[in-house]
Amino acid sequence: MIALGKRLKILDGALAVFEAKGFHAAAVPEIAAASSVAVGTIYRHFPTKEALGEALLAAWQERFNADVLAPYPATATPRAALRLTWRRMAGFARSFPAAQRFLDLHHHASYAGPASAAAEAALHQGMRELADWGRRQGVMKPLPPEALTALLRGSLAGLARYAAVAGVIPQTLIDDMEDCLWNAVATRT
Amino acid sequence: MIALGKRLKILDGALAVFEAKGFHAAAVPEIAAASSVAVGTIYRHFPTKEALGEALLAAWQERFNADVLAPYPATATPRAALRLTWRRMAGFARSFPAAQRFLDLHHHASYAGPASAAAEAALHQGMRELADWGRRQGVMKPLPPEALTALLRGSLAGLARYAAVAGVIPQTLIDDMEDCLWNAVATRT
Amino acid sequence: MIALGKRLKILDGALAVFEAKGFHAAAVPEIAAASSVAVGTIYRHFPTKEALGEALLAAWQERFNADVLAPYPATATPRAALRLTWRRMAGFARSFPAAQRFLDLHHHASYAGPASAAAEAALHQGMRELADWGRRQGVMKPLPPEALTALLRGSLAGLARYAAVAGVIPQTLIDDMEDCLWNAVATRT
Amino acid sequence: MIALGKRLKILDGALAVFEAKGFHAAAVPEIAAASSVAVGTIYRHFPTKEALGEALLAAWQERFNADVLAPYPATATPRAALRLTWRRMAGFARSFPAAQRFLDLHHHASYAGPASAAAEAALHQGMRELADWGRRQGVMKPLPPEALTALLRGSLAGLARYAAVAGVIPQTLIDDMEDCLWNAVATRT
DNA sequence: CATGAATGAGTCTTCATTCAT
DNA sequence: CATGAATGAAGACTCATTCAT
């Protein structure tokens, strides 16, 4: 019986090395060392290095989605929903800074596969629901979901890049951005 | 004397290949082919592949800075200056989408050298002057220049990523973002 | 005590895979699958893959010898003995085509060990007795046993190679060859 | 310009190593050493190790065909033609013993490609012409060309295997075999 | 100066072998 | 005894770099 713990160890080691050096500069033996696992063991769990990259990308995209697209409180308004979404994204970036940088830099990787595309689509779908809701209520401009995603994710990436230098994202900056992002998508009042 | 035309052809070919496949996945013979130049010729202009990457990164960072940090009109306010800065950044992303993606994805590359760091510092310095100016005038919050850079550049990257899917950045989105970014850095009124 | 049935299953599976792909291209897990046995079980019966190859080679050589070198009828002449020998060889090739091809292609294998050499020597010894007998009777030329073996085995290999294409060795061809081989070794009359 | 000499050196080195150890047991660096060439150079001339094996097989098959299927003298009878064919085959085996063993052991290799099949077909075609000629003259039995090829090549392989032990094929054995082979294919008189 | 054939260090991947269950 | 997950040494192949033309 394959120990599932090994798979997780490998994914963790791969995240560290891919994030630090990029996919192609990461040597499989190095990933093995970072995972405290033998080289051959990696190939028992993933058929190729590309498949490992694909699985890692999909796993973190799904985790990101699970965090960000969790249900809103029943009483939430679109404005509150956007705020919550943004805070969840920032929370993810704070909790998993390496994963956040990995997602920022590898989203267009050649090894992004169907699972990755599905996760991207699920995220867009969540954004679409939010945008449609806001539009129906007359508080948000009509907006393609990709635009909303790009806006939120781009700002988040900027903050994460700042954090890589500053060490941490100041909470005030997150809060200010929140207000700012709402203004970008809200109908003028 | 080395023909400068070849150097430019090589840098152009390298941008195309690096942007499409990443630094390590780009083979020097492939860059040579994309540049319509022989392999050996590349080594006549750049001592190593890393040096080529470093030169390419620095060249585009400098071009970005030259565009973005050009002098403001004498009559500009901080608000107008920020608007202009943002529009210049968006203009760069529109004019050189490949270069924009290259800068977004390779900023933390292992081959980023001193020239690259100097360009980054120059950009921060420009941002610092803008932030200090706005703070002295009482219209902007005190802000580390890296935060300002991250905010602008992150949003730009988000839009560029959207453009990679949608094909073009809608001008209205750029204008809305401008307003939004000002709100993020302006003192509350 | 080790179940002998497993040993035979492994030898059968190994014959199939070695014959189809060659010794080095045959992976032990593949042999295990072809034998319906776990990998570890193979190593319980044979210390190494080489030892398995050696045992397989020796086993079939011994089987070949047992078939071919069986006693002749008391009334046989050298001519009849050669005919019988040849028919026994052809019978072996018909009954065990995979083993025949395996023996043809692996006789000089690096893993051919002492048992294999002993079997080869036994075959030569049988040929020597036949050649000496014929020479003493004045009906056969003086002939090194290796030459007689090579002649018979080479012709057999040629027919087996034909059978691999045609599906079966025509009996008339076997009979004609018999005559022909006698002429090659008989004293001119 | 690629030096053609290198290609030949590689083919020679590969013949030596493949013949001695078999295709899969032959390591590419070993072939490179035997060819006095760097590993990478092999891959400049042959895309894969399999392609090298294929080219080597085809080259020697074609050489074999060129030697064996050369035109017969105008005055030749079928009997003389068969004699000449057999002597040419034996001459090939004497001149290129390593190539002969290589052809004997690798003919059914997984890497035998179209060129190899074409050469095999050409040889069969030559045999067909000989067999048809003899049949039309009433001196040879009707015989599929594959059977004729198998007969000649099998006997040759047997002699070559003997030579690997004895060092050389005795000329008398070659001559005796010649007579013997004619008897196998001639109509009974 | 430009060229591209040659080089060999380094990469991904396989597979014989081991050993805890 | 049987099993098959884990191991890591070894192999095929790539590609940055050199240098003779």
Image: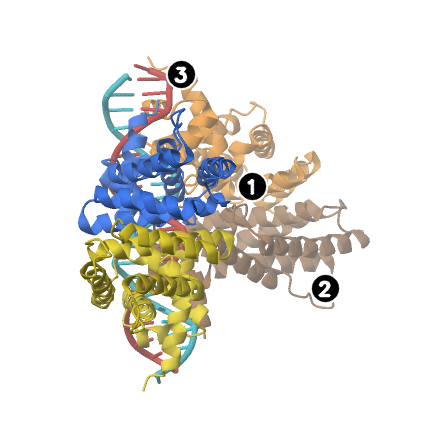
Chain colours: A brown, B orange, C yellow, D blue, E red, F cyan
Q: Amino acid at mark 2?
A: Ala
Chain of the residue where label 2 is placed in the rendered structure: A
Q: To which chain does the residue with label 3 belong? A: B
Q: Badge 1 is on which residue?
A: B157
Q: Secondary structure at mark 3?
A: helix
Q: Give neighbour class at mark 2: few <14, some 14-19, many 20+ (Cα, 10 Å).
A: few
Q: Position of residue D121 (x, y in %)?
A: 48, 39
Between circles 1 and 3, the one closer to the viewer is 3
Q: CA distance from mark 2 to mark 1?
A: 30 Å
- Label 1: how many Cα within 10 Å (few below 14, some 14–19, many 20+): many
Q: Is residue B129 visible?
A: no
Front tag of 2 and 3: 3
Asked which secondary structure carries label 1, the reply is helix
Kindly indicate the quadrant of the structure image that contains residue F9. Answer: bottom left
Q: Residue at x 58, y 51 (%)?
A: A176
Residue positioned 41% across, 56% down in the render: C21
- Using the image as rendered, state which of residue A80 and residue B2 is in the foreground: B2
Q: Which residue is mark 3?
A: B4
Q: Residue D188, image x and y in percent?
A: 44, 47
Image coordinates of residue D7 in percent, x first then y, are 32, 31
The lab-note entry on whether marks 2 and 3 share a chain reads no
From the image, tell me which residue sits under label 2: A76
- Mark 2 lies on a secondary structure that is loop
Q: Is residue D58 left or right of residue A88?
A: left
Q: Residue C79 at what x, y percent from top left?
A: 31, 61
State if disc 3 and disc 1 touch (CB < 8 Å): no
Front-most of residues D121 and F5: D121
> Of the numbered discs in the image, which one, if any, rests on residue C95?
none
The answer to whether residue C91 is left or right of residue A64 is left
Say if B36 sits above or below A33 in the image: above
**Total numbered circles:** 3
Task: Name the residue furthest bottom.
Answer: C1
